Image (spheres, rainbow, N blue to C red):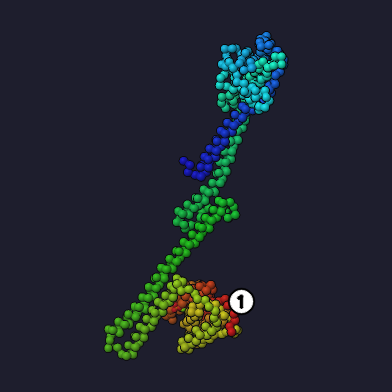
Amino acid sequence: MFKTLSSKLAAALLGLLCLIGALYSALTFYGSELYQQEVNQKLNWKLAAHLVSEKTLMLEDKVNQGALDELFKMLMVINPNIEIYLLNTEGKILACSVPAEQLQRKQVTLAPLREFMSGQGRAPILGDDPRDVRARKIFSVSPVPVEGATQGYLYVVLGGQAYDSIAQMLQGSHILRMGAWALVASLVLTLLAGLLLFRSLTRRLTRLAASMESFQRADLRDEPSAAMPLARGDEIDRLGASFNQMAVRIKQQMDTLKETDKLRRELVANVSHDLRTPLASLQGYLETLLLKEGKLSAEEQRQYLEIACKHSERLGKLVEELFELAKLDSSATPVQMEPFALDDLAQDVAQKFQLAARNKGVALEVICPQRLPLVCADIGLMERVLANLIENALRYTPAGGRVTLDLSHEQGAVSVRVRDTGCGIPQEDLPHVFERFYRVEKTRQEHAGGAGLGLAIAKRILDLHGSRISVDSVLNRGSRSTFSLPAHNVMKS
Ligand SMILES: Nc1ncnc2c1ncn2[C@@H]1O[C@H](COP(=O)(O)OP(=O)(O)OP(=O)(O)O)[C@@H](O)[C@H]1O
Ligand SMILES: [Mg+2]
């Protein structure tokens, strides 16, 4: 029944208000009765004393019936609610203003009367009602002296209205009735205000819950529908903002997961394709050699074996590159940072390619115009980056061209530029050259290049060093790959 938060809150508020209403009514009922009795008794405090001083009610030890009757008659006229009793010193009723057959008590307890006369008691003091054994009423009392000695008491019962229930009391008092209406009205108003407040508070929660549900229903794919406010507001706003951030993060992660999954699939497809092609040719040549054993000239045999050897080299390189990328991805081998001179490393790597360059008719040189600071990086991995870049430059530069490594110190970093005067990379391919297995189709045909993993490996290595690599190129004029490493604050000695 109470499924929503607002209905639960409303029910709790209603219960609370009913309780407050009941408590308040009970307090008013008993309080006002007591108050009425107190006021009544205080107003008539001296009534008995006045009456006693007015008339001689007792003569010797006898009741002065004449004076009493006069007194009864007079009071009946003034206030018929008042009952007068003449008591002896033990509290026994000697005479009374009410018909004798209505009396249910013959004697009145004296203790409250003494408390009254001592002047110490606090109103309302309640005494016995001779007409009702169970009832206790307010009174006024005064000793009746005969020749200086107390011979009895004049006990005046101040018959106030006694109510049995709140309803009865309300019927009896216009003011209380108004008060009760005011109470009911204020409780209803409080209830309405509370309900409105709960609604406004829970409305935002409901919206948030709906937004969460729809996000969940859409398999965490869509952006959360309800725009939640910034995290500056109250708890609900903060909750909404956190949910928004969480949803955006989940979505991003889902996208990344999907992207990675797509890449992985492509990778598997590419790997199997790239493995299959050289393997098939390798197998083809070896089979031919086997089939035509003895029928081939030495020259032909050598040629076939050379081709087979090239394919197996290619296969070996591909497997090695894949293994290297997997290692870099898994971070199984941590990057071992150490300070070293990048220009020395560049010279070493260039040296290794010098022979290949000369064979191809391409000039390869390292230019380093200034003294460079050391850099802090993994030497083995940096060697790999330089080798990959030089290898590309040489591979895609025709004879007569030039490959240059420029090293410079700029803004606290050592930059390396590998320039070539080769075929260049078309603009539309530039953003993709760092993707795994990406090869520009044209160069691929012409040069039967590698697997398309070299730049991906270089990029991954520089990523691990917190650095970036970029390539720019002009078609048929040449390309330039650039990266930089932060300088270690020690100069080379
Ligand atoms: N200096 C360059 N000049 C022209 N094209 C380049 C150059 N460097 C890279 N490319 C193009 O970018 C592609 C990706 O280069 P990458 O080094 O990743 O692969 P690859 O050299 O083909 O193969 P691998 O390096 O795995 O042997 C190359 O196939 C080539 O098309
Ligand atoms: Mg390459």
Circle 1 residue: 411
Tag 1's secondary structure? loop
The residue closer to the viewer here, 398 or 301, is 301
Reply above or below: 420 against 239. Answer: below
Q: Residue at x 67, y 10 (%)?
A: 64
Q: Residue at x 55, y 35 (%)?
A: 18
Q: Quadrant of residue 271?
A: bottom left
| Left or right of 380 on screen, residue 148 | right
Whether residue 138 is visible to the viewer of this picture, yes or no, is no
The residue closer to the viewer here, 251 or 40, is 40
Task: Say few, some or many: other residues with alpha carbon within 10 Å of mark 1 (under 14 / 14 to 19 / 20 or more).
Answer: few
The residue closer to the viewer here, 234 or 219, is 234
- Residue 253, given in percent of the width and then of the height, sits at 48, 62
- Residue 476, given in percent of the width and then of the height, sits at 51, 80
Q: Quadrant of residue 115?
A: top right
Q: Residue at x 34, y 85 (%)?
A: 304
Q: Quadrant of the C terminus?
A: bottom right
Q: Label 1 is placed on what type of residue?
A: Gln
The residue closer to the viewer here, 151 or 423, is 151
| Left or right of 287 on screen, residue 448 | right
Q: Is mark 1 within 8 Å of ligand 1?
A: no
Total marks placed: 1
Q: Residue at x 49, y 59 (%)?
A: 250
- Residue lying at the far top of the rendered structure: 66
- Residue 393, given in percent of the width and then of the height, sits at 49, 81
